[in-house]
Amino acid sequence: MLKKTRVVLSVVLFTLITLYFLDFRDFLPESFSFLAEIQFIPALLAVNVLVLVSLGVLTLLFGRVYCSSICPMGIYQDLVAWLSKKITPKKKYNYSKAKSILRWSILAATILAFIFGFAFLVGLLDPYGAYGRMATHLLRPAYLAGNNLLEAIFTHFDNYTFYKVSIYTLSLFSSATALITLGVIGYLAWRNGRTYCNTVCPVGTTLGFLSKYSLFKIRFVDEKCNTCGLCAMKCKASCIDSKNKQIDYSRCVTCFNCIESCHRDAMKYRFTLPGKQRPAAAVPIFSYAKEEKAENLVKPVDASKRRFLSASLVTGLAAGNLIAQEVSNGLIQKKEPKRQTPIAPPGAVSFNHLREKCISCHLCVSKCPSHVIKPAFMEYGLGGIMQPKLYFDRGFCNYDCTICGEVCPSGAIQPLTKEEKNHTQMGKVQFIVENCIVYYDETSCGACSEHCPTQAVHMVPYKGSLTIPETDTSICVGCGGCEYVCPAIPYKAIYVEGLTEQNIVKIEKEEVEEIVIDDFGF
Amino acid sequence: MDRRNFLRAIALTGAAITTMKEADAMSILTQSFETSHAAAKYDLVAVMGGEPEAMFRKAIAEMGGMKNFISKGDKVCVKPNIGWDQPVEMAANTNPKLIAEIIKQCFDAGASEVTVFDHTCDDWRKSYSNSGIEEAAKKAGAKVVPAHQESYYKTVSIPKGKNLKSAKIHQAIVDSDKWINVPILKNHGGAQLTISMKNYMGIVWDRGFFHANDLQQCIADVCTYAKRPVLNVVDAYRLMKTSGPRGKSLSDVVLSKGLFISQDIVAADTAAANFFNQAREMPIEKVSHITKAQELGLGTMDLDKLNIKRVRI
């Protein structure tokens, strides 16, 4: 019963959050962004006290329910482990000792890096953020391809329920990171279940600390248990020491698989007062786990795993150091020849704010209806790798649209009202007259001004009946309409330069003058 | 259906789509482009002072009724301006009430289907819905089709064009029997005015080419595309006098309550430009695509020579 509830809850939450990332047609209401907001690290960065307290209380009451049912990465691992069991039914887990030093070191490194302004490591290891990138860069293209297939079939029969969408790679680096995450965590899950959660994940370590003191815990019923070891074989967290009837509660993700597996009803999920230790084991009567099992317990150290884990730790620490240098040096020089400063999404406040708060879950990237947000590479500096920036190759930022700020779970992109968005300056327009068609071809164009929502780019009289663009950066919001649409080749004549700190622009309200037309005019 | 059959069906569907596309491409070559020139009483009808749908009803009646232009069984395409994510009060897009009325009359005249689309400038989903046109058109029974991907467009040749020799035009126009051009009258930063001819830029895919190769000439060129609209209906219920074509505030808009309808695209735009001139000075020579279209033989700017009906409601 307990396991069933857990599975149902997990599947529902996992499906919903995945669909929320994939849904490009707004079938799911915007309020579903709560699925991202209830995630631990985003709530921590957004200082969402309600969510943090709730998660804390939940863990102190029932154990790591967050890890078993709310965290999408946890459920991804369960899926992989489930598949691996389907394929090799004889597969069993064994108890392993907690790798406490490693866990705490990684957590410490993450916190340290974060304090030094290097949110990248948090972003990289945060299970929600990492899952978000998998959804955005790996699942989404597949989902869009499916949409396009259906579109081809339906449109052929004159049904316009579906419409075509473009599929493209947004950022090689982020896609590669997502792929490596998928591979590494998937591999660990395939072999040993929740290894990531209990050795690497900073959230797992934190909640694991709390869950040691949780009120409801899984306990052995001594009189019934014959230490057969079935429970340990089913434990994907490898935290049940069935020989000694001990459970490492810091690693238990309350999946209830052990309870389900026990033939003798010898495991119970019970209210237990904290601090009360259970007495040590009784004598085994019969054990499924024979002598070899005992050997497994002191199994030779998996050298490659240890090497991998310590390597990632060292990398993390080194990166933290690098960032400390970066902070003192200011921004690292960009490689893009044109744009000197990247453009942060509207409501990102400043590069510093973005760097501190963003975990690169890429929900904004997925949700932007105008397709203008993509992960940065080195534009924000090392600490800002994979954080969102605007680009205008496929569109421009819709003047009235406020979606990115609404969906952002960590407060990196602040939610704006339409009015606030209309006055938020993300960048400033730059006009290069030598590249302009009106200047060198002496023909009409005006595409830039056409798209300008504030008329920061407006057309003024030029030769004959021609008009040429003139810019007013004080009312430019940096939406990129002009840059996107400028037809000049090979170099655009107009583009937007980003701002490290976003501004509020004043747009004067114009009086509506009454004009009455009472004749045809011809 | 078992999996095998299902997969087979999908494969067949795919194959069918591919071959159908070929067939369509071939049929363009043989298609004839007659518009029914059956005795319209006037060359141009101008209406003032009513609601959009009432003005259209009046105008089309004066033109001899929709049956003059749409035949039984016709596949009709109605092409409004839905370029922008702006509400109806901003006059950036054609009035949805007018579109609904035109669709209704097409069906009354026996049209077998009516499609509506525009190649928008702002995000197409937002423009379609916030303009109010998607809802109004669907309610009136039309199909509202997307136009945001190159694959919806078919290459056609424009032999009479000076700068523009071929263009990718939306399949809803290419595959239609008749189409009706329904622009809104607006100021335009580049072309000075956007009316019926400029509205053609919403049926083509590559607008950048227009801007890069003498915008005004390309606008005139594209209008020589063999399949002409059977009617140009200029919505001037509200007109955007400044900051066009997007507009930035209500101070750009004039409630002018006008409507112009003609088969002659040059005459329709000339009349509308004269009307606009009353809201803000706009000498017609500045809107040089109109002159260029006259030179290409697309119609006449000499309104005095036309049989014009002026109606006030």
Image (cartoon, helix red, strand yellow):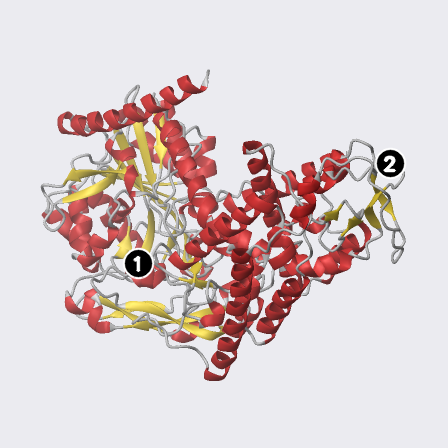
In which quadrant will I find the C terminus of chain B?
Answer: top left
Residue B172 lies in what quarter of the image? top left
Callout in the foreground (2, 1): 2
Disc 1: which residue = A485
Can residue A521 be seen in this snapshot?
no
Where is residue B233? Give x, y as percent.
31, 40
Q: Secondary structure at mark 2?
A: loop
Image height check: is A325 above or below B113?
below
Outermost residue toward the bottom?
A: A328
Nearest to the observer: residue A514 or residue B220 = B220
Disc 2: which residue = A224
Label 2 and label 1: CA atoms lie apart by 75 Å
Image height check: is A111 above or below B282?
below
Residue sitting at 51 percent across and 73 percent down?
Answer: A318
Image height check: is A387 above or below A298?
below
Classify 10 Å Cα crowding around label 2: few (below 14), some (14-19), many (20 and above): few
Outermost residue toward the top?
A: B1
Residues at marks 2 and 1 on the same chain = yes
Nearest to the observer: residue B220 or residue A9 = A9
Nearest to the observer: residue A164 or residue A186 = A186
Where is residue B232? Give x, y as percent.
27, 39
Nearest to the observer: residue B285 or residue A17 = A17
Tag 1: residue type?
Val
Q: Secondary structure at mark 1?
A: helix
Residue sitting at 26 percent across and 49 percent down?
Answer: B198
Please, which chain is the residue tagged with disc 2 on?
A
Where is residue A162? Give x, y as percent.
43, 34
The disc at residue A139 is: none
Mark 1 and mark 2 in contact (Cβ < 8 Å)? no
Residue sitting at 20 percent across and 66 percent down?
Answer: A438
Please, which chain is the residue tagged with disc 1 on?
A
Where is residue A459? Give x, y as percent.
29, 67
